[in-house]
């Protein structure tokens, strides 16, 4: 019987060897071992999801529960494949377009561990120097991720424009064999582990739920005095991001009563809240673009291909269904979150880098268990709920953005009705009545230009 190392090497040869997989082959053949004594290149044999990593309940891993620093390729890696952020491969502020060159290929049904990188701490308004920025927060050099330093210092695939580009470090795309336009890519989040014991929550001028409007006006419903951050601190006229007056709240992670919490100083004491790690951005290529920085592939607005969807229920144990628009699906991730309140009102969640493992499966029409809605629109579920999704303007940053929550709400309700009628066999009027009586519709986020609403339909209600 071949060894796990032999199976891994054989699979690499089978799918083709690129620069990244050439390094992985060397690791396999040389039995390279990570800090925890685990081969950096995991074997090709499927493995169960780990039980000792941080899950949706915020529990830690390891015997002490301490959050270790997960540098690229170090520590426990459980996927059949492994992917991390490299300055010459990631997109900073943009998502892959149709036809993008993949950085990895894999077979349907296999798993991949991705070291997702947070943008907070490396952005231009924070100095684009994570070592210096985080040192000011009391973080030692060894607690700063090497991939954060690499991207901040060496990224040059596109010319960064802080006022136009998205903030997200986007990893991918991954080509999944067998995926064709019209299929669904089933994305199962198996684990999500914080890579560092801290996060950052940022509020930036002109963004968030309480922004200053065009021409210095207040948006409907509030006064200029209620804008956040305060109008008087707005330094955008300087065109120097470090003088914009944006606010970033450093948030360390502490362990209490067997759980990990984000802790903020509130002046007279502290406020703490449990971690809920999940990926804010999971998507597939869905738009054609003639450049890497075309408006339609900006990373900020979510689209029919998913992307910056920001739904807090999509942690470990969840399944995200994405309609496929191109051969291979071209899956990507970004925007890792340690915790987020529904609405994400200040602009960001508690942003923090994560190590996530996903299973990616191609589903054809008629595939059992795949919601029919998902062949045309993103849809999700977890152990307790079905999660229909509505977006206000799901076609990307084209001709401006419609950010009307009413539109997102209506689409979420229609998608819920379609699911209940076509997949669960309910008569549509009964389904409409049920949704009003027993389902919840929640604001996903109001800060991504395209706003989102998601429904929560309890599986326990159905017998």
Image (cartoon, rainbow, N blue to C red):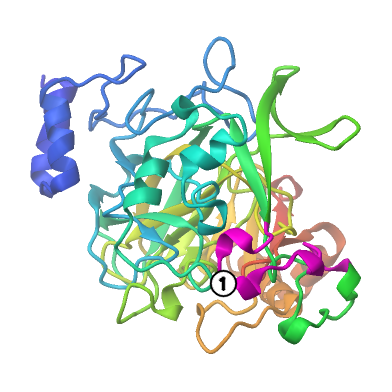
Location of residue 288 with respect to 236 vertically, above or below:
below
Quick one: label 1, few (<14), some, or many (20+) residues within 10 Å?
A: few
Left or right: residue 151 versus residue 117 is left
Left or right: residue 217 versus residue 392 is right
Instruction: Give how far across and how far down residue 142 sits, in percent.
Output: 45, 25
Quadrant for residue 239, please give it. bottom right
Name the residue: 16% across, 37% down.
Answer: 23
Secondary structure beneath dot 1 equals loop
Location of residue 351 with respect to 266 vertically, above or below:
below
Can see residue 316? no
Instruction: Give how far across and how far down residue 408 sits, in percent.
Output: 69, 74
Q: Nearer the viewer, residue 150 or 38?
A: 150
Q: Nearer the viewer, residue 291 or 332?
A: 291
Span colored in magenta? 226-246
Name the residue: 37% across, 41% down.
Answer: 147
Q: Nearer the viewer, residue 434 or 302?
A: 302
Residue 229 in the magenta stretch? The answer is yes
Quadrant for residue 70, please give it. top left
* Residue that carries the numbered disc 1 in the rendered image: 239
Q: Nearer the viewer, residue 378 or 283?
A: 283
Name the residue: 65% across, 77% down.
Answer: 392
Location of residue 80 with respect to 179 vertically, above or below:
above
Name the residue: 14% across, 47% down.
Answer: 19
Residue 390 in the magenta stretch? The answer is no
Q: Going by the picture, which residue comes out furthest to the top?
A: 63
Q: Quadrant of the N terminus?
A: top left
Instruction: Give how far across and how far down residue 349 sits, in percent.
Output: 66, 50
């Amino acid at each position: 019987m071949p060894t796990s190392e032999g199976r891994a090497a054989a699979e690499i040869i089978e799918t083709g060897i690129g620069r990244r997989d050439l390094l992985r082959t060397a690791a396999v053949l040389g039995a390279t071992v990570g800090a925890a004594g685990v081969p950096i290149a995991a074997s090709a044999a499927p493995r169960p999801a780990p039980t000792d990593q941080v899950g949706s309940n915020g529990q830690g891993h390891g015997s002490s529960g301490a959050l270790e620093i997960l540098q690229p390729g170090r520590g426990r890696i459980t996927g059949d494949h492994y992917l991390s952020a490299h300055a010459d491969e990631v997109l900073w502020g943009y998502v892959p377009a149709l036809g993008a060159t993949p950085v990895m290929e894999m077979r349907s049904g296999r798993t991949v561990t991705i070291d997702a990188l947070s943008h907070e701490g490396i952005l231009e308004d924070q100095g684009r120097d994570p070592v210096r920025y985080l040192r000011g927060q009391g973080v030692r050099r060894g607690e700063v991720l090497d991939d954060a330093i690499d991207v901040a210092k060496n990224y040059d695939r596109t010319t960064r424009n802080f006022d136009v580009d998205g903030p997200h470090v986007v990893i991918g795309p991954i080509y999944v064999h067998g995926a064709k336009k019209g299929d669904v890519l089933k994305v199962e989040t198996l684990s999500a582990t914080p890579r560092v014991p801290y996060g950052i929550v940022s509020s930036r001028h002109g963004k968030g739920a309480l922004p200053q409007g065009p021409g210095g006006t207040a948006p409907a419903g509030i006064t200029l005095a209620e804008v956040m951050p305060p109008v008087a601190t707005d330094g955008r006229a300087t065109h120097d991001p470090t003088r914009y007056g944006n606010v970033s709240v450093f948030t360390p992670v502490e362990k209490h009563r067997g759980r990990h919490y984000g802790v903020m100083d509130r002046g007279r004491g502290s406020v703490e809240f449990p971690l809920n790690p999940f990926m804010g951005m999971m998507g597939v290529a869905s738009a054609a673009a003639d450049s890497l920085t075309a408006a339609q592939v900006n990373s900020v607005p979510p689209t029919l291909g998913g992307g910056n969807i920001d739904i807090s229920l999509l942690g470990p144990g969840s399944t995200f269904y994405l309609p496929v628009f191109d051969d291979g699906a071209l899956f990507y991730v970004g925007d890792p979150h340690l915790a987020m309140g529904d609405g994400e009102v200040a602009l960001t969640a508690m942003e923090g880098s994560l190590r996530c493992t996903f299973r990616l499966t191609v589903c054809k029409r008629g595939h059992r268990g795949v919601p029919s809605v998902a062949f045309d629109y993103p849809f999700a579920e977890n152990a307790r709920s079905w999660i229909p999704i509505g977006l206000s303007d799901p076609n990307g940053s084209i001709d401006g953005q419609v950010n009307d929550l009413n539109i997102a709400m209506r689409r979420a309700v229609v998608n819920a009705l379609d699911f209940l009628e076509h997949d669960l066999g309910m008569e549509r009027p009964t389904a409409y009545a049920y949704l009003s009586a027993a389902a919840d519709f929640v604001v996903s986020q109001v800060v991504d230009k395209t706003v989102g609403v998601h429904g929560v339909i309890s599986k326990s209600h159905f017998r």
